[in-house]
């Protein structure tokens, strides 16, 4: 047993060195004054604002679309449910770049894309494209977590609520949803993190135009390409900061759960 | 208040149940596990589909969904909402009741007072003892101003002493409120102490009914 544990330390140390090395490389390649200047540059602040706007909007849209879908998949049996369930998993395993190409074709060249453009809604190569791409990759995360959260709620609570005079919508908002809130909130935080760091699909749908569709990951890409390491690192720091916020939020969401889900 | 009448109530589990419970009576339903006792309560509450007819007083409730039946139901697992404190557990049962937040809070405190637990209003279910939870569940069922009260083995998880005490309290409360009640149990002694009338179920059928002095129940008691 001791030998096994000693052996297991080798990969553990290698991974710690790798992660530590990456963090070190990101934190100290430039003088702090240069980095401070890059952090305050117009471009970095624009990328931060656009990233926050697009990722928060995407997370909200993912919640609006994903929570009812998760509820239906958890509670209702309908024809083709297994197919729908599997189909909604595809964005989770699809390479983001491929998802982006699909969205680009759908929203750019098909009837729907042309119709949207005719109504003045320009999705492709616009900031709206970033929101759409991020929603596409974030929604399945909310669906999965909501479905699991609703499945964990004892359906007998819903029966009890019915006998107490609650109509279906009152029952959902006052009993089922609060009991499932922990799983849904965790999903929302993860979806926001996924949207914040989204690159491939956003690049395809929104494009990479400075000061127009420049989210933080796209700013990293553009500035590394043009050799402006300071701005690229400043944006990378902000993305790391958002990752840290996710960790804290997740701990808070899990820690704040005061109620059990299974019964009395 | 109202009595209950069931005529030919059937579904996957129940087989043509006919039953009349007069107004303000406490009807105790006995039977082994799987006999269909809970299924009968579910049918009365509208929680499961059935054929046949159910009336509360003279009013047919067959087409009414559960939230419109005005049934107070104390489930075996009690099912107090863990995300709400005791007062809110009661207030949520008054959703259909007219009146503002203050009036509903006042009514919640009246009911908690009736149950002898006014001090528990701001506690969460997870912090309550078994007996306290039973009282809160009963108070919540009464908060709906029910026409009919359904109790599904509510005291089965308590120790014998506490269960007997709560049973006595419940009987006196039911008489005071004059509430027509179906009480499910598998404990014959408990049933005979409590019942105005009794019924025995087996394999989805009601195989006997009558006053506790009925020969069938005496025989069952002797067998026990």
Image (tube, helix red, strand yellow):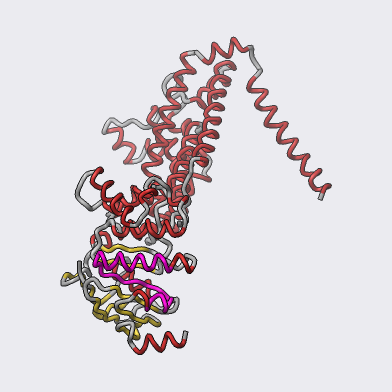
Instruction: Give the side of residue A30 with respect to residue B120, left or right.
Output: right
In this view, the residue in front, A154 or A195, is A154
Q: Which residues are magenta?
A: B164-192
Res. A68 visible in picture: no
Q: Is B178 colored magenta in this rendering? A: yes
Q: Residue furthest left?
A: B58
Residue in the picture at 48% in, 69% down: B160
Res. A245 visible in picture: yes
Residue in the picture at 34% in, 66% down: B170
Q: Residue furthest right?
A: A3
* Residue A10 on image: x %, y %: 78, 39
* Residue B25 on image: x %, y %: 26, 73
In this view, the residue in front, A200 or B19, is B19
In this view, the residue in front, B181 or B82, is B181
Q: Quadrant of the C terminus of chain A?
A: bottom left
Q: Is A203 colored magenta in this rendering? A: no
Residue in the picture at 41% in, 30% down: A54
Quarter of the view holding residue B183: bottom left
In this view, the residue in front, B7 or A190, is B7
Quarter of the view holding residue A29: top right
Q: Is residue A226 above or below residue A119?
A: above
* Residue B143 on image: x %, y %: 28, 56
Q: Is residue B220 above or below residue A117?
A: below
Residue in the picture at 20% in, 69% down: B2
* Residue A242 on image: x %, y %: 52, 29
Q: Is residue B162 above or below residue A89?
A: below
Instruction: Give the side of residue A10 with respect to residue A161, left or right.
Output: right
């Amino acid at each position: 047993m001791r030998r096994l544990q000693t052996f297991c330390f080798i990969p553990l140390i290698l991974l710690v060195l790798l992660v530590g090395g990456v963090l070190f490389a990101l934190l100290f390649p430039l003088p702090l004054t240069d980095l401070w200047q890059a952090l305050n540059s117009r471009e970095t602040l624009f990328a931060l604002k656009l990233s926050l706007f697009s990722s928060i909007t995407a997370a909200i849209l993912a919640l609006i679309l994903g929570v009812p879908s998760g509820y239906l998949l958890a509670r209702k049996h309908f024809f083709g449910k297994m197919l729908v369930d599997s189909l909604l998993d595809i964005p989770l395993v699809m390479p983001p770049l491929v998802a982006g190409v699909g969205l680009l074709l759908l929203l750019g060249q098909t009837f729907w894309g042309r119709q949207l453009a005719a109504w003045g809604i320009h999705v492709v190569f616009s900031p709206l494209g970033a929101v759409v791409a991020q929603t596409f990759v974030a929604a399945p995360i909310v669906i999965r977590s909501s479905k699991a959260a609703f499945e964990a709620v004892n359906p007998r609570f819903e029966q009890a609520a019915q006998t107490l005079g609650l109509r279906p919508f009152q029952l959902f908002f006052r009993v089922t949803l609060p009991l499932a809130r922990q799983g849904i909130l965790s999903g929302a935080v993860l979806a926001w993190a996924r949207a914040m760091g989204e690159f491939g699909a956003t690049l395809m749908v929104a494009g990479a135009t400075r000061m127009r569709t420049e989210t933080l990951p796209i700013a990293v890409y553009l500035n590394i390409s043009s050799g402006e390491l300071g701005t690229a690192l400043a944006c990378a720091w902000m993305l790391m900061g958002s990752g840290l916020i996710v960790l804290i939020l997740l701990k808070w969401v899990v820690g704040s759960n005061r109620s059990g889900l299974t019964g009395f | 208040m109202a009595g209950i009448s069931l005529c030919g109530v059937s579904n996957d589990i129940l087989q043509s149940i006919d039953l009349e419970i007069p107004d303000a009576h406490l009807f105790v339903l006995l039977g082994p596990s799987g006999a269909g006792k809970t299924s009968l309560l579910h049918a009365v509450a509208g929680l499961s589909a059935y054929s046949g007819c159910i009336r509360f007083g003279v009013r047919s409730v067959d087409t009414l969904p559960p939230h419109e039946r005005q049934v107070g139901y104390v489930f075996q697992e009690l099912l107090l909402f863990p995300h709400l404190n005791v007062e809110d557990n009661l207030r949520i049962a008054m959703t259909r009741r007219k009146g503002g937040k203050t009036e509903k809070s006042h009514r919640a405190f009246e009911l908690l007072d009736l149950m002898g637990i006014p001090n528990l209003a701001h506690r969460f279910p997870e912090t309550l003892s078994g007996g306290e939870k039973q009282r809160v569940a009963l108070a919540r069922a009464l908060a709906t101003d029910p026409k009919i009260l359904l109790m599904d083995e509510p005291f089965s998880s308590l120790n014998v002493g506490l269960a007997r005490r709560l049973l006595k309290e419940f009987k006196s409360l039911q008489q005071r409120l004059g509430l027509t009640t179906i009480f499910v149990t598998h404990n014959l002694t408990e049933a005979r102490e409590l019942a105005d009338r009794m019924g025995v179920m087996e394999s989805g059928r009601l195989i006997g009914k009558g006053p506790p002095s009925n020969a069938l129940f005496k025989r069952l008691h002797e067998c026990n």
